[in-house]
């Protein structure tokens, strides 16, 4: 929390996709808050609007009405250039299909966010994270030579390296088996707790949702339920 303000405030947000005369209200007047350092799961059926919500939080897309305020910055007011800068400096993304650059090795992939924001690399920190995520012998290997679990662990380091305050993970375990899924989620959880990050994870997997502090359930573009899990 900043003073008594929640870290994220989503207020009456709506998003409509238009295709000719047909309009599809994908998010319908959604409101919720997230506190600093909270780990929140967003669950819901396919097509319920989860990715759309993540794209708005990450400044990848623009809403039709409502407000999103993150760490006292009103994302909903920003123009595309401001949103790009905001994204680079404040958000770490983790995607289902890892989104690693195939022609760059592990180290070069991890360096990308730092290069984009013109920051120096902390080699000790990179090695610490590679060791922690059991990737120390993969530092100069190309993504095509890594397993899915290893690629996702590289993507986690890439998301964290810039020290973003907010991590947005969209189905981060969608392509992994249950053993690797639990490993990846626990790593996100432990690292983010240690580094004091706020995390929002979209998942279909109820076991993963149970590992988070709170679950927000979306149906047909509305929040139908919010539940707190026991702190673990
Ligand atoms: N760029 C777009 N243009 C038009 N319609 C879109 C666009 N992106 C998403 N939609 C529609 O918005 C709705 C919500 O999509 P969204 O991807 O947010 O759902 P989701 O809950 O993340 O689904 P899933 O779990 O399958 O990934 C769907 O009906 C989808 O077809």
Image (cartoon, rainbow, N blue to C red):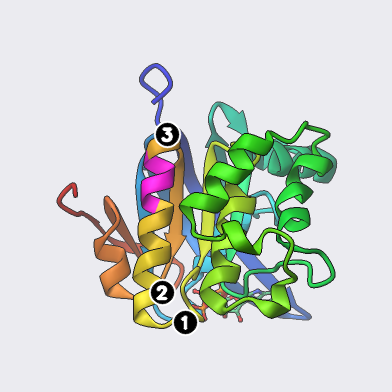
Helix, strand or loop at disc 3? loop
The disc at residue 46 is: 1
Q: Nearer the viewer, residue 131 or 93?
A: 131
The answer, for residue 57, to whether it is visible in the render is: no
The picture quadrant for ligand 1 comes to bottom right
Looking at the image, tell me whether mark 1 or mark 3 is earlier in sequence order. Answer: 1
The answer, for residue 178, to whether it is visible in the render is: yes
The CA distance from mark 2 to mark 1 is 23 Å
Looking at the image, tell me whether mark 2 or mark 1 is earlier in sequence order. Answer: 1
Q: Which residue is mark 2?
A: 180
The disc at residue 3 is: none
- Residue 214 at what x, y percent from top left? 28, 53
Q: Is mark 2 within 8 Å of ligand 1?
A: no
Residue at the limit of the structure toward the front, as seen here: 137
Q: Residue at x 56, y 60 (%)?
A: 135
Q: Which residue is mark 3?
A: 196
Q: Nearer the viewer, mark 1 or mark 3?
A: 3
Density class for disc 1 (Cα within 10 Å; few <14, some 14-19, many ≥20) is few
- Residue 224 at what x, y percent from top left? 30, 64
Q: Nearer the viewer, residue 88 or 127?
A: 127
């Amino acid at each position: 929390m900043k003073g008594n303000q929640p870290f994220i405030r989503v207020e009456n947000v709506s998003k409509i996709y238009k295709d000719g005369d047909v309009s599809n209200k994908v998010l319908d007047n959604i409101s919720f808050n997230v506190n600093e350092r909270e780990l929140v799961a967003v669950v819901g059926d396919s097509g319920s609007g989860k990715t759309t919500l993540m794209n708005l939080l990450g400044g990848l897309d623009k809403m039709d009405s409502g407000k999103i305020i993150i760490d006292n910055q009103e994302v909903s007011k920003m123009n595309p250039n401001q949103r790009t800068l905001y994204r680079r400096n404040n958000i770490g993304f983790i995607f289902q299909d890892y989104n690693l650059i195939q022609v760059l090795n592990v180290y070069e992939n991890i360096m990308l966010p730092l290069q984009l924001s013109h920051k120096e690399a902390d080699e000790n920190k990179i090695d610490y994270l590679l060791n922690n995520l059991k990737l120390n012998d993969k530092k100069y290997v190309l993504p095509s030579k890594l397993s899915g679990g290893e690629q996702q662990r590289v993507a986690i380091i890439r998301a964290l390296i810039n020290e973003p305050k907010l991590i947005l993970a969209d189905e981060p375990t969608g392509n992994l088996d249950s053993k690797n899924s639990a490993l990846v989620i626990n790593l996100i959880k432990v690292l983010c707790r240690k580094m004091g990050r706020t995390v929002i994870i979209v998942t279909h997997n109820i076991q993963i949702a149970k590992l988070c502090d709170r679950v927000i359930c979306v149906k047909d573009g509305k929040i139908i339920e919010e539940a707190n899990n026991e702190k673990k």
